[in-house]
Amino acid sequence: QQQVKQSPQSLIVQKGGISIINCAYENTAFDYFPWYQQFPGKGPALLIAIRPDVSEKKEGRFTISFNKSAKQFSLHIMDSQPGDSATYFCAASMREPGAGSYQLTFGKGTKLSVIP
Amino acid sequence: EAQVTQNPRYLITVTGKKLTVTCSQNMNHEYMSWYRQDPGLGLRQIYYSMNVEVTDKGDVPEGYKVSRKEKRNFPLILESPSPNQTSLYFCASSFNVKMNTEAFFGQGTRLTVV
């Protein structure tokens, strides 16, 4: 059961263009939505994150848009640069009530290539 | 430097030969977890630990064991590795899951089981 669906699987964008990656989730108990960036040979690193009480968060060229009613969130990379070429993972997390356990679920990833 | 350290980075082993991948963090984080990354499947959680002596299964725990005897260490054990466990493995840690804080990942361990 895939709880976080990410698209597209791969994306090619011209330098200076806008890169858009979309994610959708099913479980309304998710309460934290981070995006991770992974360069080849490296582990993922947190890029930006949002909580469901806001609809948008911007950090530099990176923006998360969040639509709670549609259970969707997206990453926008403005003025995309070749250095942004990486794999991007959306994720969703929640604490499971009662059991005290914790779940962090990742999308399948989007490989972004920014060409000069 | 704050970091999550995994060892080894690369490992080739034979089917059935027990192995351990070590993971250590120097940030005093409570929460640690293991993921495997496979093409087209993204990151899937194997096991996680909320604190010392507290571990639980993730989405794909079959064939793996973990232990958390100390706060800083969270080794991944494959008692009898099989070729379908060939994958890229990542250890991650977070300060406190109550706050849903950032997960810090290690550099990864590429495991090949022949």
Image: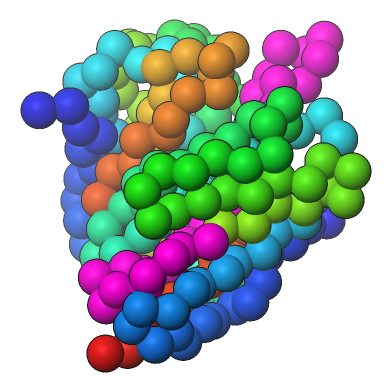
**Residue B33 shown left or right of residue B41 in the figure:** left
Residue A14: x and y in percent read 39, 87
Name which residue lies at 83% across and 56% down: A1
Q: Which of the two residues, A3 or B9, is positioned nearer the viewer here?
A: A3
Q: Position of residue A39 (x, y in %)?
A: 30, 64
Q: Position of residue B83 (x, y in %)?
A: 49, 71
Instruction: Give whichever of A85, A60 is nearer the camera.
Output: A60
Q: Which residues are magenta?
A: A76-104
Residue that protrudes farthest toward the right in the picture: A69
A93 inside magenta stretch? yes
In-image side of A52 versus B85 (left or right): right
Q: Quadrant of the C terminus of chain B?
A: bottom left
On screen, residue B40 above or below B102: below
Q: Is residue A91 magenta?
A: yes
Asked where in the image residue A32 lies, by quadrant, the reply is top right
Which residue: 89% across, 43% down?
A: A69
Q: Residue at x 25, y 50 (%)?
A: B107
What residue lies at 50% left-to-right and 72% top-to-bottom? A19
Position of residue B20 measured from the top left corner of the image (x, y, whole percent): 32, 43
Q: Give the answer, above or below, for where B33 lies relative to B29.
A: below
